[in-house]
Amino acid sequence: MSGMRVLVLGADGYLGWATCMHLSAAGHQVAGLDNYFRRDLARNLDLPPLLDPPALPQRARLWRERSGREIPVFIQDLCDYDALVEVMRRFEPQAVVHYAEQPSAPYSMMGPAEARTTLVNNLVSTLNLVQAIGALDRGVHVVKLGTMGVYGTPNIDIEEGYLTVQHKGREHTFLYPKTPGSLYHLTKAQDGDLLYFYCRMWDLAVTDLNQGPVYGIFSQEAGDDPRLLPPLAYDDIFGTVLNRFVVQAAAGVPLTVYGQGGQTRGYLNLMDTLTCVRLALESPAEPGQYRVFNQFTETFTVMELARAVVEAGAELGLQVEVNNIPNPRREAEEHYYNPVHRGLLELGLQPHYLDTAMLVKMLRLVLEHRDRIRRDLMDPRVTWQGGA
């Protein structure tokens, strides 16, 4: 399927604008919606990203100059139902990509205000989207960004969304049990349950992409224009682990490995996120189907990631050190972890695997901006035991 009208919610974020450009370049008619919620959170906490791209209208203009393609942008709050309905009436999307949620586990655990902000934003935004689709066009396919973190670290294989159980001579297939490890991850489990409910009640078509932590900066669409690169957070609240390690290495700060670093997760390159979203859109779920893909390409322990950054740093003459610090989170540091991830590969994903060359490329770019790095933003300030 090509030439769809796709509305990207959360278009200003780390994944949002890169997704807009990728889908536009693939021939889809794309619009972006955001209210700068994530950008404002970081500003209010004094957590500037290393790369700070211009606002959406400026990026839309840069993309038009680069590609000749238009991406209209709407500066609206997804938690405002009437505003969302108006945007959807104007743009008439055939599919919606839903990134518009508070994305940080540490932020969600900071205190009562941050917990409330996370819960309200993430669940009301998803509910408003469902209700707007129900009122306007129930044929709209929703691609929602989930997280592998909803599963926790069970002592059995993690299946792709569902688990078939035999009990007392009978068999039934359930959504895979969820054991989220932060309030953020809990809201991601809850929004998935909400979408599953409306698939059953209203025959909506939903693809939930349970994504592992993403790393990387580059995309084919942005090219060498730094204004089109995504915001690169490296702080302890919004920075994902590998991106944070790369910035620490460039700054000469020891890599902050939580505990012994045995925590294992599934990771993927930013470019693979873009491909996964496009593949899910172009092969949509059926009406009434709540489809789940586990979106990652490789599993690593945190210590394996640290060692990879140490090796990449050595290629550039950097002496990168590792510092094991007390773990601020409540999580198993040694555990079984074997998640299934067949669906997106079967749709045609050709992964970009983590290697030294990619990390060296990231390090070179970060080193160009080394004077912007703030060392005071890297040590964890939030514990899972009750606030900062």
Image: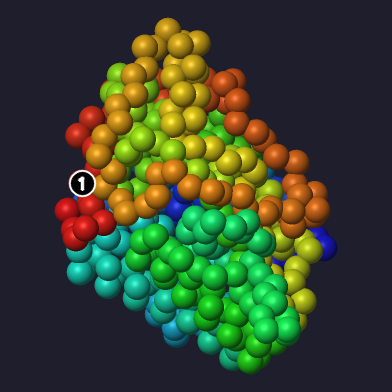
Residue lying farthest to the front in this orientation: 168
- Front-most of residues 263 and 14: 263
Q: Position of residue 374 (x, y in %)?
A: 24, 31
Quarter of the image where one finds residue 32: bottom right
Q: Is residue 169 above or below residue 157?
A: below
Which residue does the numbered mark 1 point to in the structure image?
381
Residue at point 61% right, 74% down? 175
Tell me if I can see residue 329 in this picture. Answer: yes
Q: How is the image coloured?
A: rainbow
Q: Is residue 167 above or below residue 310?
A: below
Q: Position of residue 177 (x, y in %)?
A: 54, 70
Quarter of the image where one finds residue 240: top left
Residue at point 59% right, 58% down? 156
Quarter of the image where one finds residue 223: top right
The amino acid marked with disc number 1 is: Arg
Classify 10 Å Cα crowding around label 1: few (below 14), some (14-19), many (20 and above): few
